[in-house]
Image (tube, rainbow, N blue to C red):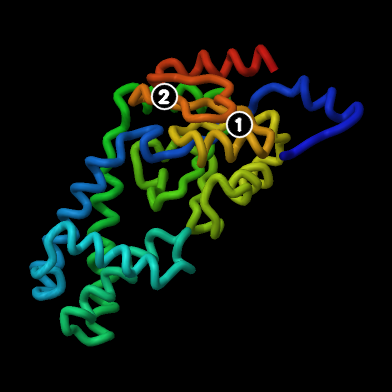
Amino acid sequence: MLRTRGPNAAKIAKMTISVITFDLDNTLWDVEPALIKAEQVQQQWLLQHRPGAVDAFDQEALFEFKKSVWKRHPELLHHVSQMRTQMLYELQIAGGYSEEDAHIGAQQAFDVFLVARHKVVFYEEALSVLERLAQRYTLGALTNGNADIYKTDAADYFDFAFSAEYIGASKPHPAMFQAALKQTGVAAEQIIHVGDDPEHDIRGARDMGMHTIWVNTRQKTWPDGDRADREVENLRQLPKAILDINDHR
């Protein structure tokens, strides 16, 4: 945890909130519909351009194949795009394609997947809330996934973005939160991290000394452990929650 002592701690305590960082999937949008559609588009591409690579797999068998790739490539744990590309490559090798064709096909199939993956539908209130917050705060994205906020309709509202792939570590590892601190040059106490995952987002940010807001759109029960500073069930509640944290530091 980031700690300060003496007069400097008192000075930091008086600082106002200036940076809001966001998780993306299931915080600003429901990711499941986009992922399902992206998987379907990828499957259609493979059936058309690499016949024999996935034809024999039902959904359960394909998932087991994916898990076998994950186990063989632990070095790609924090690189979801590379992991998917590797899985697509191995599928085509298993289907009898040459290494060259498998490499080309894996990249092309992944590109098709990624385009569809970014066709996310923001929560109804998300864009208007982001626009409002961007007028007052520096906004950043911190994601464990491979969503790129700059490929979405919210691109204009964000000042920076970091992914686990870029950092080489996933939340709650401190590296991504440290990247936000370095990028903005502010104290941890001046940042609020907003996310849906109690472990990855809330604990990870809190351990760095940041304030936290739990986005609980599905009205889940909080697990064991210290709660977030604030909880919202709808992003419309977010500006007030931020002000409450700022006023009660």
The residue lying toward the viewer, choosing from 146 and 5, is 5
Residue 14's image quarter?
top right
Identify the amino acid type marked 2: Thr
Q: What x and y, as percent, mark residue 48?
A: 8, 68
The residue lying toward the viewer, choosing from 191 and 77, is 77
- Calculate the distance from the C-alpha at mark 1 to the C-alpha at mark 2: 28 Å
Determine contact: label 1, label 2, CB under 8 Å. no
Q: Is residue 106 left or right of residue 162?
A: left
Assign a secondary structure to mark 1: strand
Q: Is residue 148 left or right of residue 187?
A: left
Location of the C terminus by quadrant is top right
Q: Is residue 101 left or right of residue 179?
A: left
Task: State whether residue 173 is above or below residue 216.
Answer: below
Residue 76's image quarter?
bottom left
The residue tagged 2 is: 221
Q: Residue at x 36, y 47 (%)?
A: 151
The residue tagged 1 is: 19
Q: What x and y, as percent, mark residue 205?
A: 60, 37
The residue lying toward the viewer, choosing from 159 and 235, is 235
Identify the amino acid type marked 1: Val
Q: Is residue 49 left or right of residue 249?
A: left
Residue 41's image quarter?
bottom left
The residue carrying pointer 2 sits among few (fewer than 14), some (14 to 19) or many (20 or more) residues within 10 Å by Cα, namely few
Q: What x and y, as percent, mark residue 194?
A: 51, 31
Of all residues shown, which one is farthest toward the front? 224
Q: What x and y, as percent, mark residue 8?
A: 87, 30
Q: Residue at x 46, y 49 (%)?
A: 144
